[in-house]
Image (spheres, rainbow, N blue to C red):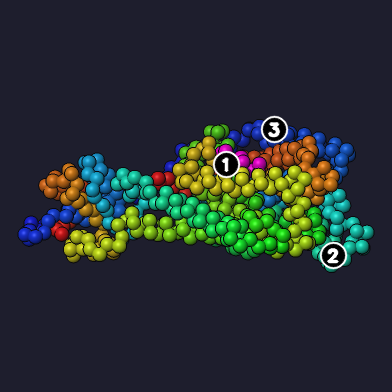
Amino acid sequence: MSHKPTITDSLQFSADSKLPTYLFGAGLAGLILSAIGYFTNTDQFFFSYLVSFTFFTGIAVASVFMVLFHHITKSKWGVVFRRIPETIGANLWIWTIFVLPVILGIHNLYHWSHEDAVATDHILQAKSAYLNTPFFIVRQFIYFAIWGFVGRKLYKASVDLEKTGDWGITSLMRKISAPAIPLFAFSLTFAGFDWLMSLDPHWFSTMFGVYYFAISFQAFWAVMILMAYFLHSQGYLKNTIVQAHIYDLGAWLFAFTVFYAYIAFSQFLLIYYANLPEETLWFYDRLEGGFQYIAYGMLLFRFALPFLVLLNREQKHRKNVLIFVAVVVVVMHFLELYWIAMPTMHPEEAHGLHFSWMDLTTFIGLGGIFFGLFFRQFKKNSMIPENDPKLDACLEKTYHH
Amino acid sequence: MSTSNDQNTELYGILAEFRNPKELVDVSKKIVEAGYDKFDTYSPFPIHGIDKAMSLEKSKLGWIVLGHGLLGFTLAISMMYFMAVVDYPLNISGKPFFNAPAWVPITFELTVLLSAFGAVFGMFFLNGLPKHHNPLFNVERFKKATDDGFFVCIEARDSKFHADQVQQLLEAAGATHIEEVYD
């Protein structure tokens, strides 16, 4: 029963692949076009940028989260694709650069950053111990210091383990992961408060942090499914990441679809039911002016459709079904962040929902850089953590009907 | 192997013991190949892949659960509709009588409750439980099935059942112990 599984695939992403170059090219083009937008419509530029920024940062932080709980639970199921989130985490320290526009655009984005507005607003005065510009800037660097450090550290530990074959490194990974889980939970919560919730500084929801976590994590599983199939389409890891592993990703996507719905709806229901003016206004703004279509769209395409489609076990390993659901979830994730942020800029009084070309260019810009960084790093080392003590058990996984 | 047969007992099947889960999986495949379909395997713990080896069709339990879930969903909606819209409409902070968001928790709970009932009682129903007596309990050795024994029993009601052929098949598959079971 115990034979060592052999890997028949090449484990090295082609070193002379031009993919990172193309992605960086697309990313730069997107960012340059967006920079033109900065001069034509500064507010729109910053809001569009914020949506794309929170989109990719949330997925990146969710990636490290997955590595953390994979280590802490001594999991075997995901060893074959653990290198993908590890590599995303390894780049998080570079991603600090991209929080700078949010800091620079603080006056365009955040009403509470205007001192004259705070001077006449009792609520903002009460919140000014937290919502003030210097502390906001300091917090951004604290978040990225935590994420960048842990992401880099776990990536390096994984590569060291691969190179040296020293299984003692697995206990180092657990020692990093255990304290990192509460650190990540708090930092992501406050990042969600800072970036998205404070757009409407009079409003508050204590579960907004877990809401940002839930939407990002659901999208993360969709991205993982697309990434696995992308590698397959390039001829990589076809016999390494097999149906049993893909099935697990499908099951995770299903689980987090339910988790997302639970969190998002709970937040809505409590506010709707209590009917307190300072809480309901946020949803009021987001259920009019065209934004209600996105809200109903989320109910249908971010919960109902993935839930019903992935409910049956057979569907969770059908390639076309999974890709379709994953794409829908990723699109809805973008729209949900748009739905959170944009009503602050485009309330119903000012035409309501209308998309700008900068929504697209900032997305392409940040996405190109994000995946360019990813593939640049991904081709430097093996695509799976070789020599990992649990790799064999993971490779042996078979799908049981 | 006893052949002594009481007058008022009849042959229930032939029970064979195997050394480990792998042998049980292998013999299940052989039994299916030989064309038997009235047989079952018994082990102290669940064995991955045994259902496939035994060529069991996919359980219908999922459909039973789905049916009960939909029933719970419908019951919840119609109950609240009757109460809050038809029978005793109350204006609660100006919200509509058909207050869909507020109805979600109860709808969810009843859907889950009836699904759980469907799962538990549907499982009992499909398993044929509760069952007070099973002829296998007449076999002293069978107690090992809850400890370290891996058994397969080919039942006499199988249309292809011939005691000699079954014995041969199980012996050839490497059974450590073969016994006839009477009811």
Q: Which residue is mark 1?
A: A325
Chain under numbered label 2: A
Label of residue A123 in the image: 2
Amino acid type at image mark 1: Val
Marks 2 and 3 in Cβ contact (< 8 Å): no
Q: Look at the image and tell me in which quarter the C terminus of chain A lies.
A: top left
Q: Give the number of the disc on residue A1.
A: none
Q: How far apart are the two marked residues, 3 and 1, measured between alpha carbons? A: 27 Å
> Are tags 1 and 2 found on a single chain?
yes
Q: Chain of mark 3?
A: A
Identify the main secondary structure in magenta: helix
Taking the magenta stretch, the answer to whether it contains residue A330 is yes
Q: A395 or B115, which is in the foreground?
A: B115
User: Counting other residues with Cα less than 10 Å from the Cα at mark 1, is it few (<14), some (14-19), or many (20 or more)?
Assistant: many
Across and down, in percent, residue A51 comes to 75, 46
Q: Residue at x 45, y 43 (%)?
A: A314
Q: Which chain hosts label 1?
A: A
Instruction: Choose between B20 and A52: the one closer to the eye.
Output: A52
The residue type indicated by label 3 comes to: Tyr
Mark 1 or mark 2, whichever is nearer to me: 2
Ranked by sequence position, the earlier of labels 2 and 3 is 3
**Range covered by the magenta-colored residues:** A323-332
Residue B26 visible here? no
Q: Residue A230: x percent and y percent? A: 58, 37
Tell me the SS state at disc 3. Answer: helix
Q: Secondary structure at mark 1?
A: helix
Q: Residues within 10 Å of mark 3 (few under 14, many from 20)?
A: some
Label 1 – label 2 distance at C-alpha: 42 Å
Label 3: which residue?
A22
Which class describes the residues within 10 Å of circle 2: few (<14), some (14-19), or many (20+)? few
